[in-house]
Image (cartoon, helix red, strand yellow):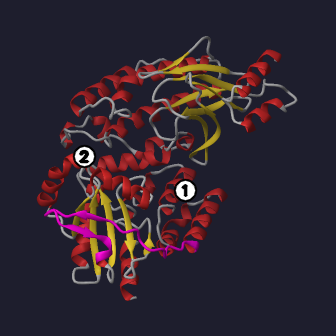
Amino acid sequence: MKRKLLFVIFICLAGLLSYTVFLAVAQTESGTENFAIVSGKWERGQPEKIHLYMMENGALKELASSTVAGDSTFAVVCKPDKQGDFFYIGKNQTQEDRYAFFLKPGDMLNLTVNDSACLLNGKSSPENTAMTLWREFVREMEAKSVYNMRNRSTYADFFPLLEQKLKDLQNYPKSKTGNSAFDNGFEKYRNINLLDIAVSYLFKPRTVHPKPEDFPDYYRNLNIADFTTTAYLLQYPDGIGLIDKVLMAKKIWIEKSAVNSNDGFMSEIGAVRNDTVKGEFALQYALRQKTYIGLSDFEEKYGKYLITENQKIRLRNRKNTLTQLKENMPAIDFAFPDITGKEISLSSFKGKAVYIDFWATWCGPCNREIPFLQKLEADYHGKDVVFLSVSIDASKDREKWKDFVKSKGLKGVQLFAGNEGNRELSKAYRISGIPRFVLVGKDGGIANIDAPRPSSPEIRPLLDSMLKN
């Protein structure tokens, strides 16, 4: 025990653990046997920090972080339950560069993350040995799906690989670590992890798009009920979002049907079997509402599905936030060329409401909003509202953008920001993802910095109220 404690103190003095974690370990009367330590080298991407998470209410919650030293070393400490639990370590909460481990009190895990894999060093627990074997089983699939931007892949090579892995999975040995809590949970983890990798691939940028008949039966046979009979999804990162992905994949790429961002998915809530998961699924959509009116309408329709006290508290917090939003500051002006090369500024539309769409030709969710935006433009034609679309495609793709605008018959005001404009807009309007919509009032002030999408039922009442003023 003394040796473990000295090891932790050494790490802390080296500056790799946060001060609060150091106090938690150093001040405990029982020493380090109640804690688990994860240390090693993170050689991929030279991150500034590494974070340790676990799941709480269906979302990742950060427990500790470590500054990565000049020699790529890091270390984090957590306090697992007696039986142990699943933890996630990574650069951030996103799917890339995030790895799952099972930690028990007293575990000391050492790993190396290099450009191709996450490797365990030295002796490891039976649980983490099993998880390492699973990571190796899906590594090639992950490279083509999760790390698609590094390893460009088409459906022509991904789909056969998926089908082969599904065959191999039939003979994959059951986990027998001697820890029944782990073995039962890990079997569920494997099935959901494989599903996540398979479905995530469909949402990655790619140059060749499959036709409905190209999809393996695995996708056609996906059934929400099959993986929502228990509450396990709440223990898997973005498990609730995975329900969305499955529904969207089937509707858009296989069934080729339009999807409304709210009611289209909420109509599927009956397929979710577990009541707590059903509540989180409903809450996920409630928290996306951009206006108090929209949230109240959503609560009236779907509030009955929120069954836990925590779900109800989070809904109340969102309502309180929406009633407190004050967005009357002047919109930050910008000017970019239209399709003819003429510079057009946002300020030139003062006196009219402006609905701004920040988008890109390569963005799938952006493209799915286009039909809804076109319908919105047609319905509000002749009224005091301007529909302003600003492309943040790379500067080299300006001609591609022009061709896209012409081929799709895009109306409204179409501007091209390019690389420099993208950086300018991202900073000014706090854009972290697209599509992103902003509403500017007739007085030139921000009416809604993160406005509802054209497919949302919230946008029309919002526009109508602005046009009355």
Query: Residue 193 at what x, y percent from top left?
Result: 45, 33
Residue 174 visible from this viewpoint: no
Q: Residue furthest bottom?
A: 469
Residue type at mark 1: give it.
Gly
Query: Residue 271 at what x, y percent from top left?
Result: 43, 52
Number of the label disc, if any, that sits on residue 279: 1
Quarter-wise, where is residue 147 in the image? top left
| Label 2 element class | helix
- Closest to the observer: 13 or 32? 13
Binning the other alpha carbons within 10 Å of mark 2 as few (below 14), some (14 to 19) or many (20 upward) gives some
In the drawing, does residue 375 fall left or right of residue 190?
Answer: left
Number of the label disc, if any, that sits on residue 349: none
- Magenta portion: prevailing SS class: loop
To which residue does mark 2 refer? 254
- Closest to the observer: 316 or 111? 111
- Closest to the observer: 443 or 76? 443
What residue appears at the point 48 percent right and 72 percent down from the top-left corner?
Answer: 291
What residue appears at the point 64 percent right and 18 percent down from the top-left corner?
Answer: 178
Does the magenta-highlighted stretch encompass residue 327? Answer: yes
Quarter-wise, where is residue 162 in the image? top left
- Tell me where the magenta segment starts and ends, as one range: 324-348
Establish if 26 lies above or below 283: above
